[in-house]
Amino acid sequence: MPGIEASQSGAGSWLLTMISDSPHEPGYPPAPARPPGRGAADTAAFARALTGLTMSVQSSRLDPLTVLIDGATDLIPGAESSAVIVAAGPARLTTRATSGPTGAPVIDLQNAAGQGPGLDAVDRPEPVAVPDLAAEKRWPLFTGAARELGVGSMLCLPLQGGDRILGALSLTATRPHAFDEESRAIAGLFAAYATIALGNEEWRVNLTAALSSRDLIGQGKGILMERFKVTPDAAFTMLVKASQRTHTKLRVVSEELCRTGVLPAGRPPRPPGGGV
């Protein structure tokens, strides 16, 4: 794939020009006057523009991961397909955003084989480089199928938030040795912002789940308070005891109480002190 200076069209060009011109999302930083070249000054200017642009996209109605992964495919030298992946269980990945012809299929191959560079990247903090798939001895169940798919080289960068690996940025190319030092540097920049976007998404999911759990527990307390004429603290104690007795999360106990009118374990709830 040609270098960054040739990226005049596609997702990368859209990433750098459409957003700053958009009448719907004010406040975006201006796009570079021309696609950055390979000189140090141009690379630095590109990095500054992308930093401001990425932060703006995060606060807009656009999906940050989709925008970033489209830009990664078009702007990282050598990349022809890209994906943001996360662990979905032992030796299994799921794709959160993908771009290019082999972005998703190469993840499916790793799930089928139970091995591959993406699986390693979501499990350890070091980048996983595959310069030449034809000469690669790791992951023998994966490499043959990937070569049939037309993959020549790969680069996978873990997305590390604090002491956790949230996922990985997976890059593929048809030719061997497609990713040079410039590729790695720019890929690291995309990986950093993909980490931010993925972390924010995880935070929103966790917050939504916490608020939902709080509502369910509150409803469960209300049922017990009304039924047994007890205080909020006493009703909460009843929920906690049912949770401990059944080895079930408090949210699940409350959900069953709201749905069926009885606490789990097959016996009606009794208020503290043995009252009725």
Image: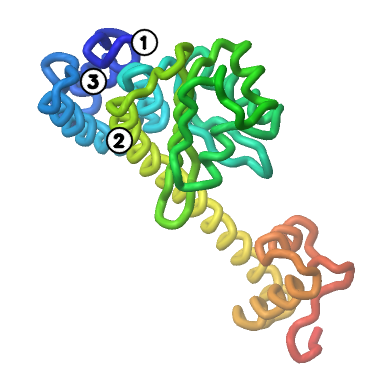
Q: Which residue is mark 2?
A: 189
The amino acid type, in three-letter code, at marker 3 is: Leu
From this viewpoint, is residue 7 visible?
A: yes
Q: Is residue 49 left or right of residue 1?
A: left
- From the viewer's side, name the closer residue of 216 and 133: 133
- In percent of width and height, residue 12 lies at 30, 17
- In percent of width and height, residue 66 lies at 41, 26
Q: Which residue is mark 3?
A: 16
Which of marks 2 and 3 precedes in the sequence? 3
- From the viewer's side, name the closer residue of 176 and 273: 176
Q: Is residue 47 left or right of residue 74?
A: left
- From the viewer's side, name the closer residue of 163 and 262: 163
Which of marks 1 and 3 precedes in the sequence? 1
Q: Is 247 situated above or below 107?
A: below
Residue at (80%, 58%) from the top-left corner?
260
Which image quadrant for residue 49? top left
Q: Which residue is mark 1?
A: 1
Dot 3: element: helix
Which of marks 1 and 2 precedes in the sequence? 1
Disc 1: CA contacts within 10 A as few (<14), some (14-19) or many (>=20): some
Residue at (67%, 39%) from the top-left corner?
91
Q: Is 19 situated above or below 196?
A: above
Q: How many marks?
A: 3
Dot 2: element: helix
Label 3 to label 2: alpha-carbon separation: 15 Å
The amino acid type, in three-letter code, at marker 1 is: Met
Label 3 to label 1: alpha-carbon separation: 19 Å
The amino acid type, in three-letter code, at marker 2 is: Leu
Disc 2: CA contacts within 10 A as few (<14), some (14-19) or many (>=20): some
